[in-house]
Image (cartoon, coloured by chain):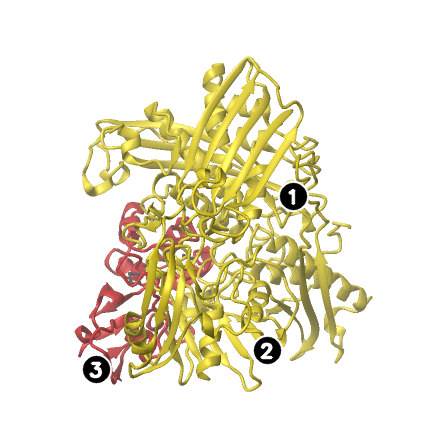
Amino acid sequence: MRLNVTVNGRPRQADDVWPGESLLYVLRERLGLPGSKNACEQGECGSCTVYLDDVPVCSCLVAAGQAEGRQVRTVEGLAEGDRLDPVQQSFVDAGAVQCGFCTPGLVVAAHDLLRRTPRPSDEEIREALAGNLCRCTGYEKILDAVRTAADAS
Amino acid sequence: MTTSTKSTVTRTDGIGASPRRPDGTAKVRGEFAYSSDLWHEDMLWGATLRSPHPYARITGIDIARALALPGVYAVLTHADVPGVNRYGLEHADQPVLAEDVVRYRGEPVVVVAADHPETARRALERVEVGYEVLDPVTDAESAVAGQGAELHPGGNVVRHVPIRRGDPDAAAEVVVTGRYEVGMQDQAFLGPESGLAVPAEDGGVDLYVATQWLHVDQRQIVAALDLPEDKVRLTLGGVGGAFGGREDLSIQVHACLLALHTGRPVKMVYNREESFYGHVHRHPAVLYYEHGADRDGTLRYVRARIYLDGGAYASSTGAVVGNAATLGVGPYDVPNVSVDCWGAYTNNPPCGAMRGFGAVQAAFAYESQMDRLAAACGLDPVEVRIRNAMAQGTVMPTGQVVDSPAPVEELLRRVRAKPLPPEPSGEPDLRTLPGGVSNTTHGEGVVRGVGYAVGIKNICFSEGFDDYATVRVRLQVVGGEPAATVHTAACEVGQGLVTVLQQIVRSELGVERVTVEPSDTTIGSAGSTSASRQTYVTGGAVREACLRIRDALGALSPAELGDKVLDETVEWRHRPTEELHPETGQGNAHVQYGFAAHRAVVDVDTELGLVKVVALDCAQDVGKAINPQAVLGQIQGGSAQGLGLAVMEEIKTEGGVIRNPSFTDYLIPTVLDMPPMSIDVLELADPHAPYGLRGVGEPPTISSTPAVVAAIRAATGRALTRVPVRPEHITGT
Ligand code: FES
Ligand code: FES
């Protein structure tokens, strides 16, 4: 099937998409956007989080066909040119990135949190990020990063 | 060797500072190329058919229907392995593809390449393998006793290490005994096993892969492919965490075989379920301990028997056994020691390296014993530990004299002195209670407990291993500015080695621009990214190369080099170690020891058995914090993995079959499970190590588990002799 989807503001087209392919697979393997990650492909880790029409979703659980005609924003679409989004910048500065495999999903989840709640409490941050697994950091510096990004915005 | 750093330049981006990671920006932008992100024109997808049985004889393999499927380019069996169909880190005992027998559920039998991952999966379904199912060996202790089928020639003991020191018949006034169990933990790195193999015109292959040691992969691949070393070139793909789980081969030989067979690039990526079958795990253990002490708590002797389940293939079981045995009494001064540790072959999933490597299992047992001893002597748990704490000058059970700081007592004092979190008061926030917002309690039945633990880990490779790193450092003026490049084969797996190497060069050469080139096999080995060794060994090598460049510079400053290029390649090794005596376990087997202590505070819902870790504070000596931010990151992340083993993480097997190969059923800590940590980092220089540094990554994983369990014991009064602690252990139902 042919899929039409707007990704990071650009209309894109993917041909020969199989019915079983996920939005994550299409982004990574057909549209050249491997930023969203594939740590579980079962909706358990959040590494594949993208905005679908402004709502963060696990793209591994979204069938590609469901994205037809809709807007997708991935981690690759957060920075403006060389200027990182404040969330991205604070992840780098705070040491919230080790292997970084969780980072794209966490950055999108934190970006969404700060859009909705510009000054979140620690409990609110934890709740918002509870669906994103990180195996390297123990989360402390991720919390630091989100706090800093909230202060910066 | 000298450790003087007198002429080292102090900089804000050098040693002791916390400059940003060079790969950080690419990682937050989603532009860092992990091994699973690689793509090549014309590439095929590889997939692996695995044994559904823990132990079976293969009676036949029929690939015809799979080959007939349109879109399939290759279906390969053991008959297609051109070289030796055996590989392994310590013993080459594991088939690349199974021949006559499969020894674990998940063992690779057939690999395919196809034009779409789904086609590859369907091809696997069409392969017919006949099996005659055999009775699996699933218990390490009885395997050591010689019961059940012999899984490998020579029997089911991979290694036995005895340690004998002092009087084997020593007696004591107070005796405490215990039997402890440690479940099988998974590394659960987030980046799945993956890579891309590209066939080359010279008949060789280029492999881009996530791994922990390029050269040891290369050694095993060339043997299986029957190719000379220069025909198999490896480049490190971006690595999404490792924690020991990438020391053994996964896709490496399979992807190369498929690429050479089809003449097309082949990509392989495991999904999460396959990842649970595709890498080794932490050895489950059964440990029997007896501690004898004077009434005042002074240890007279420790006797222990430790059984580690190595699963179907040896992997690094031998070295894990060595660690569990030599570190078996913990960071304590014990005059009389008798420890026996065995690693067994069974038909359970293969086990090998995971952060803490043998020291984790022993620590759960010896720290549980120290708490029992404290109770038996009527002493405070910290007091009994301090009374027996080892120090610089202590003689280890191996006879090795500890010749650098061992601040066990101070670490314990520090975590004890930290303020405790406030007692819950008023209307509790559900989010802070065991069970969280699932609203299982409003505070009734919740009891608080505090527990302590301290642990020890050997740093770098031990037991006489020739442990070295090769590095090349070049200095030249580029665009009017001095710039240095560093080339090594060392694997950055997330820990931040690339940052640390830049810092060392900046401080030693006084240049700001330092590029760390991609790691590959065009340079000699840097050894493994394991045993907390890379900053020590590859960092030590970079320092040495810089010192030579400084010599060559003489009175010149780097900016005055003109068009000269200073170029130094160095192979650097730490001081040698010795093998253990086979009967007594005596020998200077370790290079360096690392120590950390934790204090855990938990709230336990005693009715439902749910645990909330409220605080997990830590003190660790790192000798010298080359990058303080990264040191904290290691301590936080390592402590989280220890917490996971304490209360949730276990691969459950039944008759050798993994029951929970997914993140739905294998739980790792989330941000809701990790409490804030207060951390003290000590910097007591080790005079034998570069900059006085001590490996950082593993010690915090070791003491965190027993500290959390001790806190749950304190809250519940339960004996809790097994990790992970499950709700039913707490409620007794
Ligand atoms: S990859 Fe989508 S949630 Fe894990
Ligand atoms: S940084 Fe590695 S998983 Fe989060």
The percent coordinates of residue B306 (x first, y second) are: 51, 35
Report the residue marked by disc 2: B231
Can marks 3 and 2 be said to lie on one chain? Answer: no
Report the residue marked by disc 1: B592
Mark 3 lies within 8 Å of ligand 1 (Cβ measured): no
- Residue B334 visible in image: no
Mark 2 lies within 8 Å of ligand 2 (Cβ measured): no
Residue at the spot x=72%, y=49% of the render? B576
Circle number at residue A4: 3
Residue at the spot x=67%, y=65% of the render? B471
Can marks 2 and 1 be said to lie on one chain? Answer: yes
Task: State how far apart marks 1 and 3 are (Cα).
Answer: 59 Å
Q: Amino acid at mark 3?
A: Asn
The hue in which chain B appears in the rendered picture of the protein = yellow
Task: State how far apart marks 2 and 1 are (Cα).
Answer: 37 Å
Is the C terminus of chain B in the top left, top right, bottom left or bottom right quadrant?
Answer: top left
Residue B711 in which image quadrant: top left
Mark 3 falls on what kind of element? strand
